[in-house]
Amino acid sequence: MVAALAVFTVVLDAGHGGSNLGAAGVEAHVHEKHLTLAVTRLVETRLRARGVKVLLTRRSDTLLTLRERVRRANAWAPDLFVSLHFNASPDRSQRGTEAYVLDPAGAALEVHRAGARAADGKTGADAEAAKVQAEHAQDHARALAWEVARGIQRRVCGSLAEASGVPRASLDRGIRAGALDVLRGASVPAVLAELAFIDHPVEGREILRPKVQADLAEAVAQAIAEASEKAPRAGALDRDPGDAQVKPRIPKGAR
Ligand SMILES: [Zn+2]
């Protein structure tokens, strides 16, 4: 069937850009927007080398609204949307990695919308079948998002631990089901990762090193590539409702 030949496609979103600087780093001239773009482009290179198709919401220092980022991602209809950020804390004491996936309430809203779109113009059993299919696609989307988020946590924390000598477990801030604006409205599996703290006196300096940036990018690329190997391709469900009995295992709650 056609789906087996499809190339896994990911939209990478480098957080912030242009006049939206993001969080301030430990050095005055470095802001979050610089690091997100640098790491995102490294992730792009590494994923391409693995045969993954990659699209970027921005590839230069330009301003994009959250709505525009999501609009682009939805229009390109990828298998996955990943937004990359760096974190900051009020007293500059925090360090480590955290990831976000769309929370159940947000996901339910998207299911409702997708179901309504799919059922549009259909009646009776057809409309019901379209809704069930939209819900099923959403189950897959949620499972893939959690798989990617888990992989990012494991691999990025491992990379930061190696760079700093800090135990990996104390850098793992977990996965949160959040109603983040950049994820809300995404009609594809969506993950937002806060890779490290840009303003921590030690971690904020480590992530300025090209070697550490390259390792972070490799960690994110590995997480995405691994999850992609297990995932059905976008649109596969539309083309082949026959595999609708295969339900993915959906993790319960955040760690
Ligand atoms: Zn950010």
Image (cartoon, helix red, strand yellow):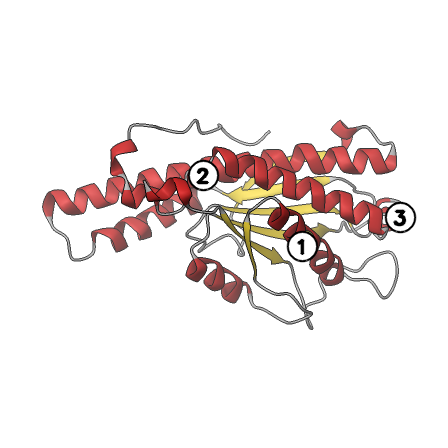
Q: Nearer the viewer, mark 3 or mark 2?
A: 2
Q: Is residue 92 visible?
A: no
Residue named by callout 2:
142
Q: Nearer the viewer, mark 1 or mark 2?
A: 1
Disc 2 residue type (three-letter): Arg
In the image, 222 versus 195, the foreground residue is 222
Q: Residue at x 89, y 48 (%)?
A: 201
Residue 143, percent from left and from top: 46, 35
Indicate the secondary structure of the residue bearing disc 2: helix
Up the image or down, 79 lies above or below 155; here it is below
Q: Residue at x 87, y 64 (%)?
A: 28
Q: Residue at x 40, y 46 (%)?
A: 234
The CA span between labels 3 and 1 is 23 Å
Residue 94, percent from left and from top: 79, 42
113 vs 80, left or right, is left
The CA span between labels 1 and 2 is 23 Å
Quadrant field for ligand 1: bottom right
Image quadrant occupied by the C terminus: top right
Query: In terms of sequence position, does the residue under pointer 3 or pointer 1 come before the other?
Result: 1
Q: Residue at x 46, y 63 (%)?
A: 71
Disc 3 residue type (three-letter): Pro
Up the image or down, 170 lies above or below 220; here it is above
Residue named by callout 1:
40
Residue named by callout 3:
201
Disc 1 residue type (three-letter): Thr
Image quadrant occupied by the N terminus: top left
The outermost residue toward the left is 124
Residue 2, percent from left and from top: 34, 44
